[in-house]
Amino acid sequence: MATFDHRFTVAASKEAVSAFHFEPGILKTLTPPLMIMQVHQFEPLAEGSVAEFTMWMGPLPVYWKALHSDVSVDGFTDTQVAGPMKSWVHRHRFTAVDSQTTEVHDHIEFEHHSGLRGLRSRLLFPPPGLKALFMIRAAITRREVRRRSTHPNHYPQ
């Protein structure tokens, strides 16, 4: 089983960073600009909630269905129950560095299928691609959390 780790800090309280991740529509907010995200179902983040979507990576549709668990102000886990990988468990953790700085830690344990099916997921999710995706998501998170703290009435709480 392979792993991927990405850490970054946000100049905001843990509660603000956590609240951002609990917002409706967060999946589309965190989607990189050149990727198209078609959300089929996205229940409010809670124990047992489901996210079902198709990511368009260029001309290729990638269907994904995830189940959320371990949901708290400290983070949550999403586990792929249907999609391109043999297995995918993504843990999101929020840790207060101090009262106005939060570390976000994404830890993913994943496994590709064998054969041609695995070739597709290896091409779509190579380590440099995952690194780029999470760097973009870090930049979006920092920008959006800052916007929400500056204009709190313009965004869902």
Image (cartoon, helix red, strand yellow):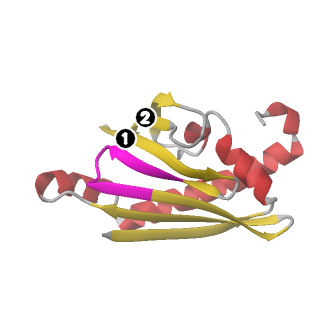
In the rendered image, which quarter is residue 57 located in?
top left
Q: Residue at x 42, y 51 (%)?
A: 79
- The verdict on residue 80 being magenta is yes
Would you place residue 99 above or below residue 79 in this image? below
Q: What kind of element bears circle 2?
A: strand
> Which residue sits at x=67%, y=59%?
74
Q: Quadrant of the C terminus?
A: top right
Residue located beneath label 1 in the image? 64
Q: Which residues are magenta?
A: 77-89
Which numbered tag is attached to residue 151?
A: none
Which residue does the image show at 45% across and 43% down from the upper left? Answer: 67
Quadrant where the image shows the N terminus = bottom left
Earlier along the polypeptide chain: callout 2 or callout 1? 2
Q: Is residue 72 magenta?
A: no
Instruction: Give percent across and percent down for residue 22.
Output: 66, 42
Specify the label residue 52 is tagged with.
Answer: 2
Tell me the element at label 1: strand
Are the residues at dot 2 and dot 1 in contact (C-beta closer than 8 Å)? yes
Question: What x and y, as percent, mark residue 33?
Answer: 54, 43
For label 2, count other residues whose C-alpha is less than 10 Å away and answer few (under 14), some (14-19) or many (20+). some
Mark 1: few/some/many CA within 10 Å (<14, 14-19, 20+): some
